[in-house]
Image (cartoon, rainbow, N blue to C red):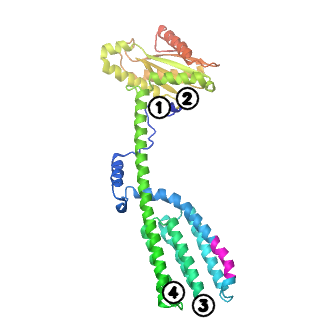
Amino acid sequence: MLDPSPAMAYRGNPARSDGAGSETHRPELEQLVEDLLRVRMSRLKLPPEIKPLFLRRMRRNIRKNTAGWCFWLAMLTILNGVFDAFIVPPRVFPLIVAERVLLAACLLTVRQLVKRDLFVPLAPFYLGLPCVLTVIIAGIGGLAAHDTGLLNRYLDNAMLVDCTAMMFFGIEFSFCLGICATCLPLIALFLGFAPLANAARLQVMFFDVTAFLSIAYGRHVQNLILARLFLLNMRDEIRDAAARARHAQLSSIAYTDPLTELSNRRYFDEICEAISANATSLLPVSVCMIEIDHFKKLNDTLGHLQGDRCLKLVAATIRNHLRGPSDIAARFGGEEFVLLLPNTGLAAARDLAERIRGAILDLQHPNPGAPGGIVTISIGAADLQNPPVTIQSLIATADTALYRAKQSGRNRVST
């Protein structure tokens, strides 16, 4: 493959764009992003055209965070079981151990689901399960031990777990509120069975409610900030895509012949210069000079519009016979075309030239000024087997072969 310089890397077919950024660069999307960036952050709400992309991008980052959170909490749960042996009554210790094993297994299962990105629509349910299960296990363990202090510590730990969960994987504000609405009544229920004074219960519940709602609202604010940053990044991406599209269009104009849509002489000269400098690995390399026979007579007889149509047909035929992206066809000037064929010896180049000549002949395109009354072409081919690679001298040799073909009666290939 020819890749002489970064600036020319995309120009295997300069008339074609790679389409990068075409999905992002849409004027209506750009205007929508600009309008959203003018909205106050507290009122920002992503529309259906943008929100799925935001959630998809956020899920990539949150997947790693959530998987790490599940593993950390599973290990912490198991390690805390060691301390339970010293602080809980022996009769309830097996129950506590069983609960901790159950919670650790649940967390590790959720971790696998998150890492593999399975059952994405059900994610709010299986992500919220460890949060609810943590509160249930804490409450049952504390009540079974008949120890108010232990119950409070267990519930505080459960609340810490739920708060970190909302910080790590809470995308939607409604999801955080769902955890609060499920866990807070459970905490109140367990506190109701504990031998606490009403003031103590109210104090604990006030602290828990405040902590839960503060974390949930903080997550909501963080989501708004992330959405704002997402819109800013999206605006930059749209502008970059537009700039790349304009650059590709200008490059295509600069290096493409507008009539035939083949590469132009400027592009061909740059390729030749690059190959001559550092592309000996492309040897053998061949060049074919192609000229439409009696083209001036066609223009004089049928007019320039028919002459342009003839140039387009010949160019399209040449392009259809290229063997791959490494073959380069260019309009050399006027009615002349040139083929640059890397890794191609003279025999293969002559065979390709004969196929192109025959295809032009089969078109039977009229040329009243030609002896046979149809368009034909003459081709001169030359190759270079050994370094140094001097493409310009190779072109001169092929041009000499083309002159011989015309002198020998035209409509032929000469080497």
Q: Residues within 10 Å of mark 2 (few under 14, many from 20)?
A: some
Which residue matches tag 4? Answer: 191
What's the mark number on residue 13? 1
Distance Cα–Cα, label 1 vs label 2:
14 Å
Distance Cα–Cα, label 4 vs label 2:
75 Å
What's the mark number on residue 4? 2
Q: Nearer the viewer, residue 269 or 400?
A: 269
| Residue 7 appears in the figure | yes
Q: Position of residue 211 (x, y in %)?
A: 48, 74
The amino acid at mark 3 is His
- Front position among marks 1 and 2: 2
Distance Cα–Cα, label 4 vs label 1:
74 Å
Q: Nearer the viewer, residue 6 or 312?
A: 6
Q: Position of residue 105 (x, y in %)?
A: 62, 73
Seen at 40% across and 41% down, the residue is 242
Is label 4 in contact with label 2 (beta carbons under 8 Å)? no
Seen at 48% across and 66% down, the residue is 170
- The answer to whether 39 appears left or right of 188 in the picture is left
Q: Position of residue 183 (x, y in %)?
A: 49, 78
Majority secondary structure of magenta residues = helix
Which residue matches tag 3? Answer: 146
The amino acid at mark 4 is Leu
**Mark 4 or 3, nearer chain start:** 3
Is label 4 in contact with label 1 (beta carbons under 8 Å)? no
Q: Residues within 10 Å of mark 4 (few under 14, many from 20)?
A: many
**Secondary structure of the residue carrying numbered label 3:** loop
- Front position among marks 4 and 2: 4
The boundaries of the magenta stretch are: 75-85
